[in-house]
Image (tube, rainbow, N blue to C red):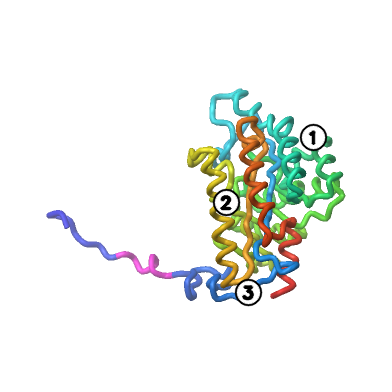
């Protein structure tokens, strides 16, 4: 230690935990290693379940950034029309290129909708409804964040408004949830259970679903890979479009190989029409979908269908 400095012992409170058990300091879920769990078998003997999640988002121009600027949101002084209109491009142009690509390779997707976008753009919502695809709730809009310190009743109203708006407008039951920016308060999971949500996709600490405990009852965590997300790879990590294709294909190959020894796995791809729906990128999405559709051991389904199959085997 530097001369003149005295060692000061930590206060005992720094070593005291309200809950402590093997591997964790909480009881949100049971500790387990992926490699030791009961093997899963997907329908028709397939080894890899493919979940393509398409984010349908609205980013407000008058962004509040409370308690932080949302990833992908406005980053320039108001009015940040450059970024606002780019996000809107996804809902006006990019989504239809993505839908065409999905249909070309007969890939089923799940659509995570902001409640406000569903209310604002009935045509867009009806397009997805007519396809018969599963819709999950993606919060109210991308600047309506769930976070620590948020008033409980304020968050309860926000979650209820988001889910009920989507249920009323879509006619679907809506049992899945993805938080804007994947951010939560400690109350969020319990409030989701209060509103009839059975699975959420904010936690990415696993490759397979797992049972999540809340004060209001059980919930299923359905991990949606952040590492393979288009926005994360292309705009956050600044990797090339070719690298995006390579990373998804590598993940597919590895999970297929792993499934031979350890049972079925899930390949979860999160995509954004304002990112991959661009003219210079849509071809790369098509390359990915073409590669995946050529794999004989892949079962493609909605997130809810994949979870149903998983739960039936537990």
- The residue located at (80%, 50%) in the rendering is 133
Q: Nearer the viewer, mark 3 or mark 2?
A: 2
Q: Nearer the viewer, mark 2 or mark 1?
A: 2
Task: Sort mark 3 into few (<14), some (14-19) or many (20+) by Cα contacts within 10 Å.
Answer: some
How far across and down, in percent of the image, does residue 253 sit? Answer: 57, 58
Which picture quadrant has residue 196?
bottom right
**Dividing the image into 4 quarters, which one contains the N terminus?**
bottom left
**Front residue of this view, candidates 140 and 202:** 202
**Front residue of this view, candidates 184 and 117:** 117
Magenta segment: 10-16
For the residues labelled 3 and 1, the Cα–Cα distance comes to 42 Å
For the residues labelled 3 and 2, the Cα–Cα distance comes to 23 Å
- The residue located at (66%, 56%) in the rendering is 295
Are dots 3 and 2 in contact, CB under 8 Å? Answer: no
- Residue 121 image label: 1
Q: Nearer the viewer, mark 3 or mark 1?
A: 3
How far across and down, in percent of the image, does residue 243 sit? Answer: 51, 43
- The residue located at (58%, 31%) in the rendering is 74
- The residue located at (71%, 74%) in the rendering is 313
Task: Sort mark 2 into few (<14), some (14-19) or many (20+) by Cα contacts within 10 Å.
Answer: some
- Residue assigned mark 3: 39
Q: Is any part of residue 247 visible from this angle?
A: yes
**Dividing the image into 4 quarters, which one contains the C terminus?**
bottom right
Are dots 2 and 1 in contact, CB under 8 Å? Answer: no
For the residues labelled 2 and 1, the Cα–Cα distance comes to 34 Å
How far across and down, in percent of the image, does residue 38 sit? Answer: 62, 76
Question: Of marks 3 and 1, which one's residue comes earlier in the chain?
Answer: 3
Which picture quadrant has residue 187?
bottom right
- Residue assigned mark 2: 249
Q: Is residue 10 above or below residue 88?
A: below
Residue 81 lies left or right of residue 106; in this view the side is left
């Amino acid at each position: 230690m530097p001369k003149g400095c005295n060692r000061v012992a930590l206060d005992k409170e720094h070593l005291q935990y309200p809950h402590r058990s093997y591997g964790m300091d909480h009881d949100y879920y049971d500790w387990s290693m992926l490699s030791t769990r009961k093997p899963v078998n997907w329908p028709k003997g397939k080894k890899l379940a493919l979940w393509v999640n398409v984010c349908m988002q609205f980013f407000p121009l008058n962004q509040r950034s409370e308690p932080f600027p949302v990833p992908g949101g406005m980053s320039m002084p108001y009015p940040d029309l450059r970024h606002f209109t780019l996000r809107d491009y996804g809902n006006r142009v990019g989504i239809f290129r993505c839908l065409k690509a999905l249909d070309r390779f007969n890939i089923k997707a799940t659509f995570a909708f902001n409640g406000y976008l569903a209310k604002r753009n009935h045509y867009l919502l009806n397009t997805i409804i007519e396809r018969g695809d599963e819709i999950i709730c993606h919060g109210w809009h991308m600047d309506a964040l769930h976070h620590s310190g948020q008033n409980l009743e304020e968050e309860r109203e926000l979650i209820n408004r988001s889910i009920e708006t989507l249920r009323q407008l879509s006619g679907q039951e809506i049992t899945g949830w993805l938080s804007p920016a994947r951010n939560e308060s400690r109350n969020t999971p319990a409030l989701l259970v209060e509103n009839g949500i059975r699975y959420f996709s904010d936690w990415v600490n696993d490759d397979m679903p797992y049972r999540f405990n809340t004060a209001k009852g059980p919930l299923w965590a359905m991990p949606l890979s952040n590492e393979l997300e288009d926005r994360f790879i292309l705009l956050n990590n600044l990797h090339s479009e070719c690298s995006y294709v390579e990373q998804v294909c590598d993940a597919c190959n590895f999970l297929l190989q792993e499934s031979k020894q350890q049972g079925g796995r899930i390949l979860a791809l999160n995509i954004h029409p304002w990112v991959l729906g661009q003219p210079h990128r849509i071809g790369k999405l098509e390359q990915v979908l073409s590669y995946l559709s050529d794999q004989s051991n892949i079962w493609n389904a909605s997130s809810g269908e994949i979870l149903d199959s998983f739960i039936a085997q537990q």
